Image (cartoon, rainbow, N blue to C red):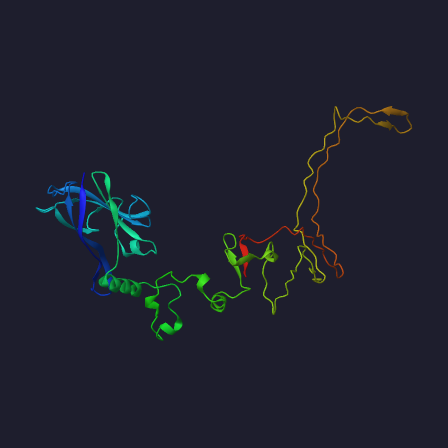
Amino acid sequence: MFKRIIVATAFFAVIVSHAGLGFAGPSLINLQGRLADPQGNPVKAPTQVDFYIYQGGSANQADSGTVVYKERVIVTPGPNGEYSHLIGSGTPLEGHTLTVDDFDTTQDVYLQMVMGGTPLLPRLKFVSDSYSFISIKAHIADTVVPGSITSDSISSGAVTSAQIQDGAVTASKLDAQISGGIIPSGLIGMFAQGCPSGWSHFSLLDDHFPMGAASYSGNTGGSAAITGLTTEVAGAHAHTVNAHTHGVGTLTVGPPDSVETDYKSQGGAWAAAAAHVHPLSGATEASSPGTDTQGAHTHVIDSDGTWRPPYLGVVFCKKD
C-alpha cells in the first residue's frame, strides 16, 4: 500500500514558441509531492504511477467523471520520498497529448493517481493561481469565439487573397448576387452526366437542336417531314443513245416444243406438216430515241423524319 503526501501542486503552464507567429508548445503541469507507506515511511524505490485527468466527478469517488488524459511514468523519489513530475511529459496511454482544451469545461477537473493498480483518494482538484489566470486570458486571446469578429474588427484591406486558404470559400458562403454573377440564372449548359446541384434538366431540348433567335420563346418548332422542295423546267431537250445493233442469233423450234401446223397445197387438200424449224438471222439498225419536254411540274419527296446527321447525345441543364 502507498500513501500520497502532496507538498505542492504548481500552476498550469503553456509554453509558447515565438518563432514567427506564436505556436503553442507542450502543455505541462508541475506536480510535487512525497510518497510514503501507510506508516509514514518514505518510499525511495522507483515506482510506476499512472496519472489520470477527469472532467467532472468528485474528489472521493475513483474513476468518476470523464477521463480526458492519462499517462504512465516511473517516479523516482528522493531520500525522503519526495518527487517532482511534469504531467504531460510522460507516455500517453492512448496517444493523447495534454492540451488546454482538457481544462476547458465548467465542471471541476481532478487529477487521479493510480499506484500498484489502486487509485489514491482523495483525488486532487485543479485550482487556478495568478499565473493561471494570465494563461487563461492568453488562451482566450488565442481563441476565436464564433461571432466575435465583425467587419468593424477588421482593418480595411487587411484580408487579401494570400490570407484566404485555397478551397476555403465554398458556393454556400457566397452572396446570391455574387454566385449569380459567376453563373447567371437561366444559363443552359451541356453536361456529360446528370444535372449538378443548382441546375435543372431542360427537357425542351430533348431530341431537338438549338437554334439562335432574337428572343427566347419557350416553344419548340420545326418538323420531321421535308417540305418546300420544287423542280424547274430545264427546256426542250433529248437524250441521245449511241448507235448499236442487236444480234438475234438463230431461233430453233423442235421437240418437245414442236409446233404442228396444217398446210394446203395449191388446189389440194389440208394436210399435217412435219416438224420443222425456221432459222432467223439479221441485225437491227441504230435508232436515236429522245424524251419529250414536259411542262412545269414538281416532284413530291416524302420523309419519315428518322434521318439525322451524326450526333452525340448530351444532357441540357438550366441554371436555377
Q: Which residue occupies the extreme left position in the image?
A: 79
Residue 255: percent from the left, percent from the top? 74, 24
Image quadrant in which you'd find residue 169: bottom left
Count of numbered circles on the image: 0
Residue depicted at x 28% and y 50%: 110
Q: From this view, report whether residue 19 is shown above or below residue 27.
A: below
Residue 125: percent from the left, percent from the top? 26, 52
Q: Which residue occupies the extreme bottom position in the image?
A: 156
Between 290 and 63, the residue placed more toward the observer is 63
Between 229 and 46, the residue placed more toward the observer is 46
Residue 207: percent from the left, percent from the top? 60, 54
Q: Which image quarter is the C terminus in?
A: bottom right
Q: From this view, report whether residue 155 is shown above or below residue 240.
A: below
Q: Which image quarter is the N terminus in?
A: top left
Residue depicted at x 35% and y 68%: 161
* Image side of residue 296 versus residue 14, left or right: right
Between 165 and 206, the residue placed more toward the observer is 165
Residue 188: percent from the left, percent from the top? 54, 61
* Image side of residue 49 versus residue 284, left or right: left
Residue depicted at x 32% and y 45%: 64
